[in-house]
Image (cartoon, grey):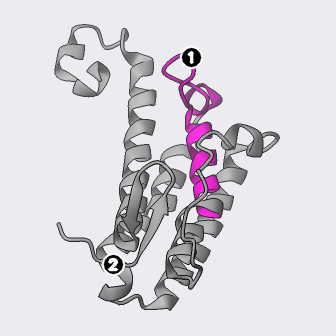
Amino acid sequence: MKYTIDHALEVLEQTPKVLNTFLSKLSDDWIFCTEGENTWSAFDIVGHLIHGEKTDWIARMQIILSDAPDKTFELFDRFAQFENSKGKTLLELLDEFSVLREQNLNHLKSLNLSEDQLLLEATHPELGTVTLKQLLATWVVHDLNHIAQLSRVMAKQYTTEVGPWKAYLPLLNT
């Protein structure tokens, strides 16, 4: 599928609703389970998404659209949620994510970006030259990636409980 802002918005607008529906009434056993050492729980994933809303997608878009001579992104701290989410509940994180996402999407829509603007470039410190279109497409896939991750982490809690049906459940074998 070719990237369009309208297609992207279809997913980006749904992510807070999906997370709220999926996670808001679960017990801590589901919210804080992981796949093992150095892996993320649902709580961690929502915190990570919040950090992205604050420091990644829109901030980097602004760099690309700016007139600055140096359009190099700062590295994204993929682990900031472990500090930023301390003392908060999952419901507080879900609410914060919903508010931030709505603000960011309203800002994106207000720009009425042209095809030429989507081809503007910046420099990612690890990946090199990237376009605005690539950044915005990555935002969509990033959401979908973490939704899949949530499902995988939670499903793996019943890996042994499903017994022989594990053979029919690819999610448990990844």
Label 1 belongs to which residue?
Answer: 37
Q: Position of residue 40 (x, y in %)?
A: 55, 31
Above or below, 164 against 21 in this view is above
* Residue at 68% across, 43% down: 80
What secondary structure characterizes most of the magenta part?
Answer: helix
The N terminus appears in which quarter of the rendering? bottom left
Closer to the chain start, of discs 2 and 1, is 1
Position in image of residue 90 (x %, y %): 67, 44
The C terminus, quarter of image:
top left
Q: Is residue 31 left or right of residue 84?
A: left
The foreground one among 157 and 12 is 12
For residue 91: magenta?
Answer: no
Identity, as a three-letter code, of the amino acid under mark 2: Leu
Label 2 to label 1: alpha-carbon separation: 40 Å
Judging by the rendered image, the residue that carries numbered circle 2 is 119
Specify start and end residues of the magenta stretch as a single range.
27-54
Say what amino acid the circle numbered 1 marks: Glu
33 vs 73, nearest the viewer:
73
